[in-house]
Amino acid sequence: MTAVTIADLPRVRSRHPEAVAEAAARRTRRPLLGDRGRLLVVAADHTARGALDAGDRTLAMANRTDLLKRLCLALSRPGVDGVLATADILDDLLLLGALENKVVMGSMNRGGLQGAAFEMDDRFTGPRADDLVRRGFDAGKLLLRIDYDDPGSLDTLESAARTIDAMAERRLPVFVEPFLSRRVDGTVRNDLGAEAVTTSIAIASGLGATSAYTWLKVPVTDDAADMARVMQASTLPAVVLGGDVGPDQDATYDRWRTALRLPTVHGLVVGRTLLYPPDDDVATAVDTAVGLL
C-alpha cells in the first residue's frame, strides 16, 4: 500500500490492519544524530496518560485528526529529526508516510495515569525493547518520577532499570526523563528546583548494568542560569524537554537557548509547546526551535 490520508485511516485500520506492519517494514531509517550532531524531536505521547489539555485549551489533544495534522506539519518542516509517541500515534504516522527518514522513539511506560492513585507506580504499558527492534524503531523513552513518600516509585525505579538493561542488550538508545515529584493537594507536581533536578539526573544515570545507551531527557530548571551546574551531575548525553504551553514563548525559547549551549545537551524533545503554541502557528514555532539548534 502507498501512504494514505488522515480521512482514510479508519477504513485502512478496519480492513487492512496488516498495513501498519508493512509500512514499518519499508520505512527508510536514519542515524539518531545526523551530520549536525543535533536532535529536534516532536513529542506526542501525552494522550495515553490521559493528559489531553494543552495550556488553557481543555481536551485539545483529544481530537486525533487535528493532532495528526499538527504532527504531520511539524514533521514536514526542515530540521525536524523525528517524533516520540505511543504505538497508536506511531501507527497512524506510519500509514500516513510521515516517518520516512525520521527518528522514531517509542514511549514505553504510560501506566501512571494523570491524577490516578497509582500514578507513581508507572507501569510499562507501551512497547518493550523487543517490540521496538521488531518494528524497526530507533529508540525508546521512559518517564521516571520519584516520590520519596510513595512506595509505587520503587516499582517504577526497578522496572526502569531492567528496561534500560533490555535496551542496552539490543544496542538501542533509551531516553530517561527523571523527576523528583511530590503530591500537592492530591496532584503530582515535579520539582524543577536546581537541587531536585540534579538529584534526579544522578539517580537516573546510575540505573541498569550499563549506561552506554542511556540518554537523559531533562527539564530546564526554574532558574535557567542553574542549568550549567545541574548538568555537571552526569556525562550522559541529554536533550531538553519542552514542558507545557506557556503564555511567553520568547522566554521559553531563551531558556532552551541557554541549555543548548551546554556540552552534554544535544537537542530538544518538545511536544505541546510546538504543536499547540499560543498563536496556533505550528510552522513558525517549529522553525524557531530549529533555529535554536
Image: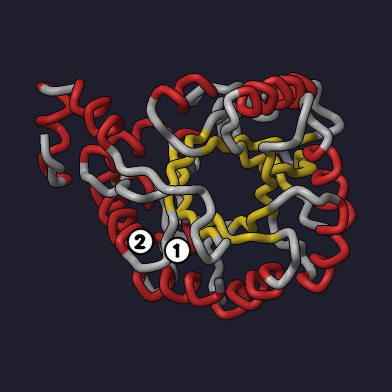
Does residue 67 sit above or below 106 in this rendering?
below
**Residue 266 location in percent, x, y?**
63, 60
Q: Is residue 60 left or right of residue 211?
A: left
Quadrant into which the N terminus falls? top left
Image location of residue 116, percent across then percent down: 60, 28
Q: Find numbered disc 1 in the image and state the secondary structure of the residue it sits on.
A: helix
Point 53% across, 58% down: residue: 39
Across and down, in percent, residue 176 comes to 67, 40
Looking at the rendered structure, the kind of residue marked 1 is Leu
Quadrant in which the C terminus appears:
bottom right
Question: On screen, 268 above or below 260?
Answer: above
Q: Which residue is mark 2?
A: 74
Tags 2 and 1 in contact by the CB under 8 Å rule? Answer: yes
Residue shown at 23% from the left, 45% from the top: 97
- Where disc 2 sits, the SS reads helix
* Residue that numbered label 1 is attached to: 274
Q: Look at 81% across and 44% down and name the residue there.
A: 200
Q: CA distance from mark 2 to mark 1?
A: 8 Å
